[in-house]
């Protein structure tokens, strides 16, 4: 049971959130609990959707974006996000189980993606205070400065959803995946 109101439908959400939720429904064919819970604050939902939409137009591939999401969710212990992103990684990004498990462990079988995932892990573990060598390493793997900024933005976006789901105990509406015990 969530700690704050989870609107049961688009119509039960705050009026200002309804058009945003209708957009999610049109895009995904449903409105996952994360979106309905975030709809309690129309501005928070708008902010999340805006950043998510902008980053989807970036240079990072959908596969790399899912890899980062899985690594961040694992570190933060967010079962909701692990469940959602394991589903998306498998069904939309077409990553196999071995790759998903590697991503959850902070790596990738793809050498370039591995650099992005490892950098994302360092960002989370060091709370953004990475070394110059860490930035140089991800750039040497072939990422532009714009893409390195996008990696940081994806870490921030995923941290936001991890914190929302953990703080409010969002019910998982995907096949359940649990974080590994630390």
Image (spheres, grey):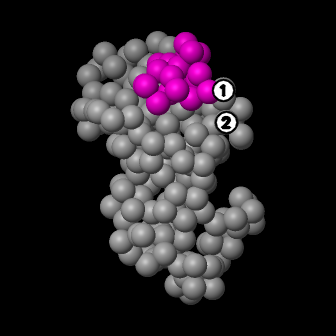
Stretch in magenta: 97-116
Q: Secondary structure at mark 1?
A: loop
Location of residue 163 in the rendering, given as x and y in whole percent from the top left corner: 36, 55
- Residue at 54 percent across and 32 percent down: it is 67
The residue under label 1 is 96
In this view, the residue in front, 123 or 34, is: 34
Q: The C terminus is located in which quarter?
A: top left
Question: Can you tell which mark lies on residue 90?
Answer: 2
Q: The N terminus is located in which quarter?
A: bottom left
Q: Residue 152, can we see it?
A: no
Within the magenta stretch, is there residue 179? no
31 lies left or right of 7:
right
Q: Residue 76, can we see it?
A: yes
64 in relation to 160, above or below: above
29 lies left or right of 71:
right
Residue at mark 1 to residue at mark 2: CA–CA distance? 6 Å
């Amino acid at each position: 049971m969530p700690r704050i109101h989870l609107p049961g439908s688009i119509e039960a959400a705050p009026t200002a959130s309804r058009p945003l939720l209708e957009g999610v429904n049109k895009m995904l064919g449903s409105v996952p609990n994360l979106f309905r819970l975030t709809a309690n604050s129309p501005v928070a939902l708008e902010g999340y959707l805006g950043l998510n939409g902008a980053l989807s137009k970036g240079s990072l591939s959908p596969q790399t974006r899912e890899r980062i999401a899985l690594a961040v969710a694992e570190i933060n212990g967010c079962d909701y996000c692990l469940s959602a992103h394991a589903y998306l990684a498998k069904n939309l990004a077409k990553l196999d189980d071995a790759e998903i498990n590697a991503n959850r462990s902070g790596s990738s079988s793809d050498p370039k993606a591995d650099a992005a995932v490892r950098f994302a892990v360092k960002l989370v573990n060091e709370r953004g205070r990475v070394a110059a060598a860490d930035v140089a390493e991800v750039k040497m793997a072939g990422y532009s400065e714009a893409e390195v900024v996008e990696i940081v933005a994806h870490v921030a976006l995923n941290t936001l959803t991890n914190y929302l789901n953990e703080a409010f105990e969002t019910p998982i509406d995907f096949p359940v995946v649990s974080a590994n015990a630390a």
